[in-house]
Amino acid sequence: MKKIALITGVTGQDGAYLSEFLIKKNYIVHGLKRRSSQFNTDRVDHLYQDPHEKDRNFILHYGDMTDSTNLIRLIQEIQPDEIYNLAAMSHVQVSFEIPEYTGNADGLGTLRILDALRLLGLEKKTKIYQASTSELYGKVQEVPQTEKTPFYPRSPYGVAKLYAYWITVNYREAYGMFASNGILFNHESPRRGETFVSRKITRAVARIALGLQDKFYLGNLDAKRDWGHAKDYVRMMWMILQAPEPGDWVTATGVSTSVRDLVRMAFAEVGIELEFRGKGVEEKAFVKSCSDEKSQLAEGKEVLAIDPNYFRPAEVDHLVGDSTKARTVLGWEPEYNLKALVNEMVQSDIKLMEKERYVKDGGYDILNNFE
Ligand code: NDP
Ligand code: GDR
C-alpha cells in the first residue's frame, strides 16, 4: 500500500520540493492550493497529472487554512497517513501589514488541522508535521539556538507561529498525537519567493550583470541568518515524521552570514567584487572590479543602496542553529553549503533573465502585451 500525504502550502517553495521528494518515495501526494485569479501552480506544474489519468500520485484540491469546514472535509476524504502543514503567510515584513490575517492563517490554521484530526477520529492514525521556524527565537537570548533556547518572537508572523508551535505540542501531549515541530532556519533555492532577501539579491545580480537593471535597494544589511538549501530541509521534514517518537527538531547548517556578505557572495558569482561605503541608511555598494567579460560593469558603478522602507518595525538580528539533535538522533546532514546554494540561485536567475532579455531584444515587451 502506498502511503498518503497531504501537503498544505503545496504551491510554495517547500511544498514543491517536498512533493517531488515524497513522490520519489512512492507516496500519493495530495496538495492544498488556494483559489487565485491567475495560475499559482508554477512550482508544481511539472508534477501535474490530468484528472482523467488512472493511478494519479499527485492530486490538488482547493482549500484555505482559514476555512475549517473545507479542511475537515478534505482530511476526511483523503484519510492521510501524514500531513505536512506548510501553508502560511510566510513573509515576516508583510505580517506587520496584515497581522490579523497572519494570526488566522498561520496560528489558528494549525489548530484547525489538529482539531480536524481529532474530530474525525484520526488522531492515532495521522502523523502531522508543523512548519515551525527560527523566527520563534526572535530577540537573541542565546547563540547558537537549540530546542531548549527560550522563544521571543519579534513579528506578528513569529507570534502566530509561536501559537502554532505550542498548540502542536499541546495536542501531542493532550491526545497522544504524533505531532512534531520542525524548527527550521532559513532555507532558500531557485524556487524561493522573489521578495525574500536571498532571491531578491540573486535576481538583482542577474539583472545587473545582464544590463537589465542599474541598481537595487535593500534594508538591514547587518542581520545575520543561517541559510541552507530547501532540498536538504524537506528531507528533514520527512525524517521527522519517520522518527521513533514525535518531538521538536532544530534544523540548521550551523553557519551564519550577514546580508551584506550574502550580497558580496552573489556578486562574486558573476565575477564582480564590491566595495561597501558609508554607514546606516547612507551605505552603498560599488563595483570594485569586474572580471566578467559579458557584463563589463564600470569600476565605481553604484549597484546597491539602502531603502529604509525595508527596515522592519522590530528586527531579528542574529539566527544560527545548533542541530545536534537532528544530526545525532536522525542522522540528518545538509548536503549543500551556502556557496553551492548561492551559485545555484544566481545561475538559475541568469537563465531566467536571459530569457527576458531575449524577449525584449526581439522587440516584444512581455509586460505590455494586453492591448
Ligand atoms: P512560501 O511562502 O513559499 O509558501 C507558502 C505556501 O502557503 C504557499 O503555497 C501559499 O499559497 C500557501 N498559503 C498561504 N496562505 C494560505 C492560506 N490561507 N491557505 C492555504 N494556503 C496558504 O513558504 P515556504 O515554502 O518558504 O515555507 C513553507 C512553510 O515553512 C511556511 O509555513 C513557512 O512559514 C515555514 N518556514 C519557512 C522557512 C524558510 O526559510 N523557507 C523557515 C522556517 C519555516 P500561494 O502559493 O497561493 O501563495
Ligand atoms: P526572514 O527572511 O525574515 O528571515 O524570514 P527574509 O529573507 O525576508 O529576511 C532576512 C533578513 O534580511 C533582511 N533584509 C531584507 N529582507 C527582505 N525580505 N527584503 C529586503 O529588502 C531586505 N533587506 C534586508 C531582513 O530584515 C532580515 O533580517 C524567512 C521566511 O521564510 C520565514 O517564513 C521563515 O520562518 C524564516 O525565514 C526562518
Image (spheres, helix red, strand yellow):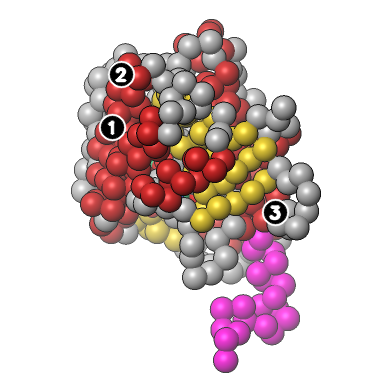
Residue sitting at 30 percent across and 41 percent down? 108
Find disc 1 in the rendering and name its residue: 162
56 versus 359 height, above or below = above
| Residue 48, label in figure | 3
User: Which of the two labelled residues, at mark 3 and mark 2, occupies the earlier sequence position?
Assistant: 3
Q: Is residue 260 above or below residue 204?
A: above
Amino acid at dot 3: Tyr
Residue mark closest to the camera, 3 vs 1: 3
Crowd tier of the residue under label 3, counting other residues whose Cα lies within 10 Å: few below 14, some 14–19, many 20 or above: few
Within the magenta stretch, is there residue 119?
no
Q: Examine the image and state in which quarter residue 123 appears.
A: top left
Instruction: Give the camera-side residue of 176 and 353.
Output: 176
Instruction: Say which of marks 1 and 2 sits in front.
Output: 2
Say which amino acid is labelled 2.
Ala
Counting every numbered tag in the picture gives 3
Which image quadrant is residue 181 in?
top left
Q: Earlier in the sequence, mark 3 or mark 1?
A: 3
Callout 3: CB less than 8 Å from ligand 1:
no
Where does the image place residue 5, in percent across and percent down from the top left?
59, 35
**Comparing labels 3 and 2, the label whose residue is closer to the camera:** 2
Image location (x, y in percent) of residue 241: 53, 22
User: Which sits in the foreground, 355 or 326?
Assistant: 326
* Extreme residue toward the bottom, this view: 371
Q: CA distance from mark 3 to mark 2?
A: 38 Å
The quarter of the displayed image where residue 268 is located: top right
- Residue 271 placement, left or right of 233: right
Q: Is residue 199 left or right of residue 284?
A: right
Residue stretch in magenta = 352-371
Tag 1 and tag 2, C-beta contact below 8 Å: no
Please tell me whether residue 353 belongs to the stretch shown in magenta. Answer: yes
Tell me if residue 193 can be seen.
no
Image quadrant holding the C terminus, namely bottom right
